[in-house]
Image (cartoon, rainbow, N blue to C red):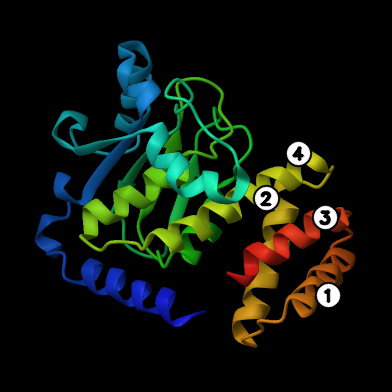
Amino acid sequence: MNKRILAICLAIFMALAVIPTGFADSSDQVVITYGETAYMNQQYKSIVDDYFASKTNVDINSIESKVVTAGDVNKISGGFSGKQYNSDQIFSSALLDLNQNGEITVEVDSSITTITPEMYMSALKSAGIQGGHVYVTSPVSATGESALAGIMNCYEEATDVEIPENVKEAANQEIATQAEILNNSNVSADDLSKLVDDVKEKVNEENITDHATIVNIINDYSTTYNINISDNDIENLAQTIEQ
């Protein structure tokens, strides 16, 4: 784990540690980010609010909220993937609840079709985020790729710790790369997530920075888990993990 991410981990941990326990049910520890498409459509927003209301005891109307725009998402995604979202494509919304202690957990609604809880957790840990409970939903079927920007914004709002843009970009690239691999292959999301986590763990533990070595590690784990992905996807994944 590089020094920048380690510093962010420590900052967020300290921010979480000083939240008063006497406010266990406080809405101050819950933040919502709405995808702008969902927010601008009252029917869509009601669907999102109803889902989040079923997941927390806090009055949804009293919760701090922000709107994530296409511009926000494009800022951290367009640079590496070339993918650009329009303002009518940002449906995914997220709720962060810091009342629930322990390691980070992510619950994804069935409306999210591609990105799994494990993928979100892996990317968030790459961004230095280690705690809290996250819920992700959409009023219509959506891949969930754009939700990561909202989740990271939730943490910044709740902890008052800014996540550097390059760290956000790296986390978002991890999500996008895995989504692309799923689209290009028959590998299951769970198997891919396990492979990525194991490769990242080995790379971090041994402080590996050499690209060819990371490629070899990915190939080794692909063989171990009987996962067949293309050389191009392996290259892209290695570049993502290098960050």
Counting every numbered tag in the picture gives 4
Q: Which residue type does callout 3 highlight?
A: Asn
Q: Which residue type does callout 4 highlight?
A: Asn
Residue 161 pos. (x, y %): 25, 63
Mark 4 highlights which residue? 183
Mark 1 highlights which residue? 216
Mark 2 highlights which residue? 178
Q: For label 1, count other residues whose C-alpha is less than 10 Å away and answer few (under 14), some (14-19) or many (20+).
A: few
Q: Which residue type does callout 1 highlight?
A: Asn
Q: Tell me the mark number nearer the camera, choosing from 1 and 3.
A: 3
Mark 3 highlights which residue? 232
Q: Which element type, helix, strand or loop, lies under badge 3?
A: helix
Residue 128 pos. (x, y %): 41, 68
* Disc on the earlier residue, 1 or 2: 2
Q: Is residue 118 visible?
A: no
Query: Do tag 4 and tag 1 residues touch (Cβ < 8 Å)?
Result: no
In space, the residues marked 1 and 2 are separated at their CA atoms by: 18 Å
Q: Is residue 236 visible?
A: yes
